[in-house]
């Protein structure tokens, strides 16, 4: 054991430098891929590429374990070396905590089916917080260590700096180039990473849209608005807990009475084609359920009001040849599919109200599918057509690498 450790520590200085640069490259890849994963801009444009980026991110994340573990083997020696340098010691601790936090929360997000939503939600919060704190810290740390930033040109020219001379560094005028560049960098980082950090803390610098704002400014023009049933308003669920992230792979579409309708066709006895008024005349039910996205976030205790999917299928009369149900979005791009058995679960719903309010267009209104026991990539927004089919259809995200098995794991969940 001691021999083995001695071997690892041989050529220690060089190894530490290699370790440092490997680590830096991996973190760079993680930072870029992570920011792409969170960005709506790239969600809309990448398609299949998003799932590739996700795998690059996960593999780079797992790779990051190696330099961290290796460093820990060298840490004893390094620590002694840093004896009289408290600033560097603090830096090492901060970096190690960041990396460990990213790795632990990242592994939970990666293995979300093993852990379930009650783990992935806090893990995602931590992953995000570390990103908004850690990235600016690491960028500042790397840039201010670049040689040309460290020393003034005229000082670099002085070869044999005496300690006394070096001591003068602190008395450098405030307007020196180095101080200027450091403050510029700090300013840029604060502008870039400040807003998401404040948002994380829950103190938006400029108010972003609340659900109330979304409803008030809804781009949909459906008249009359759907009238909530007494169970829906006030919501029997007590009001949803959590925040939806607006996800879309197209521009967000908007509808009015002339452009919206719901069709149920394919292998059915009686094709259905309803305009808005006809749709609103149908019997609706209310359910309280959780909503889980496969990237790790959830919204709990949603009160949804709408038409049970199984009720719709019954009305249309499913033919024997029909084995699957395909869902179309009014964005003309997004689709998904359920087996007939899945489609007949009680909580599969064509929803029109959320917590007693019309579903705003950002969140898939006027009408969206709800699939509470499955990840929300099944829950097609701007739903306008349901087709009964014989062969399975592979949905938008499933075609691009998401798991065909979308069941949400309840392992580790607080649900009873
Ligand atoms: C420098 C370190 C890292 C940074 C800056 C970083 C950044 C990010 C960001 C910004 C996201 C998007 C989160 C969101 O949607 O709110 C993300 C997601 C994710 N990260 Fe990391 N991450 C890092 C390390 C890791 C590690 C070590 C792993 C472990 C394998 C990992 C696994 C994941 C997974 C599985 C997701 C969810 C992907 C998805 O489905 O969208 N990350 N990361
Ligand atoms: N038409 C359409 N429906 C969609 C999506 C989409 O991009 N387009 N994204 C899906 C995914 S992955 C999730 S998590 C939920 C997000 O719903 P929200 O935007 O209302 O939060 O919608 C699902 N339905
Ligand atoms: Mo999702």
Image (cartoon, helix red, strand yellow):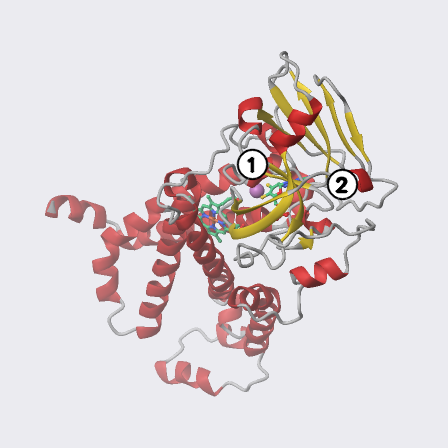
Q: Give how far across and how far down residue 344 sits, in percent.
A: 56, 28
Residue depth check, mark 1 versus mark 2: number of the one nearer the observer = 2
In the rendered image, the residue lying farthest to the left is 2
Whether 170 is drawn above or below 370: the answer is: below
Give the secondary structure at mark 2: loop
Residue closest to the eye, 261 or 87:
261
Provide residue 395's location: percent of width, then percent of height. 62, 28
Describe residue 10's horizontal placement relative to residue 330 as left or right.
left
Seen from the viewer's position, the closer of residues 270 and 337 is: 270
Q: Which residue is mark 1?
A: 51
Residue in the image at 70% along x and 50% along y: 362
- Horizontal side of 193 relative to 317 (left or right) equals left
From the viewer's perspective, tell me whether residue 239 is left or right of residue 331.
Answer: left
Q: Secondary structure at mark 1?
A: helix
When asked about the image quadrant of residue 215, the answer is bottom right
Label annotation for residue 281: 2
Q: If you read the primary sequence from the N terminus, does the residue marked by circle 1 or circle 2 appear first?
A: 1
- Looking at the image, residue 373 sits to the left or right of residue 165; the answer is right
């Amino acid at each position: 054991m001691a021999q083995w450790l001695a071997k690892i520590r041989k050529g220690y200085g060089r190894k530490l430098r290699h370790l440092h640069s490997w680590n830096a490259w991996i973190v760079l890849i993680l930072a870029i891929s992570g920011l792409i994963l969170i960005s709506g801009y790239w969600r809309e444009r990448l398609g299949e590429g998003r799932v590739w980026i996700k795998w690059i991110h996960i593999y780079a994340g797992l790779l990051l374990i190696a330099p961290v573990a290796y460093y820990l083997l060298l840490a004893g020696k390094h620590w002694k070396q840093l004896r009289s340098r408290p600033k560097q010691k603090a830096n090492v601790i901060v970096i190690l905590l960041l990396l460990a936090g990213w790795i632990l929360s990242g592994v939970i997000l990666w293995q979300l089916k093993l852990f379930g939503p009650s783990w992935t939600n806090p893990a995602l919060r931590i992953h995000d917080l570390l990103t908004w704190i850690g990235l600016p810290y690491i960028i500042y740390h790397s840039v201010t260590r670049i040689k040309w930033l460290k020393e003034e040109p005229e000082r670099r020219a002085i070869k044999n700096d005496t300690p006394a001379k070096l001591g003068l560094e602190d008395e450098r005028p405030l307007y020196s180039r180095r101080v200027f560049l450091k403050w510029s960098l700090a300013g840029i980082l604060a502008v870039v990473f400040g807003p998401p950090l404040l948002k994380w803390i829950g103190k938006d610098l400029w108010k972003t849209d609340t659900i109330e704002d979304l409803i008030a400014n809804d781009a949909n023009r459906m008249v009359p608005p759907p009238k909530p049933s007494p169970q829906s308003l006030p919501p029997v669920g007590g009001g949803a807990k959590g925040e939806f992230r607006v996800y879309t792979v197209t521009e967000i579409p908007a509808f009015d009475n002339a452009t919206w309708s719901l069709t149920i066709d394919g292998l059915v006895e009686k094709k259905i084609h309803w305009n808005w008024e006809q749709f609103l005349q149908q019997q609706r039910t209310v359910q309280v359920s959780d909503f889980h996205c496969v990237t790790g976030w959830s919204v709990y205790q949603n009160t949804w009001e709408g038409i049970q999917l199984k009720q719709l299928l019954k009305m249309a009369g499913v033919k024997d040849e029909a084995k699957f149900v395909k869902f179309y979005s009014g964005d003309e791009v997004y689709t998904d599919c359920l087996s007939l058995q899945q489609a007949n679960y009680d909580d599969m719903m064509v929803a029109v109200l959320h917590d007693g309010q019309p579903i705003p267009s950002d969140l898939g209104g006027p009408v969206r599918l709800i699939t509470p026991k499955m990840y929300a990539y099944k829950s097609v927004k701007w739903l306008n057509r349901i087709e009964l089919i014989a062969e399975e259809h592979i949905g938008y995200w499933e075609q691009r690498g998401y798991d065909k098995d979308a069941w949400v794991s309840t392992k580790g969940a607080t649900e009873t």
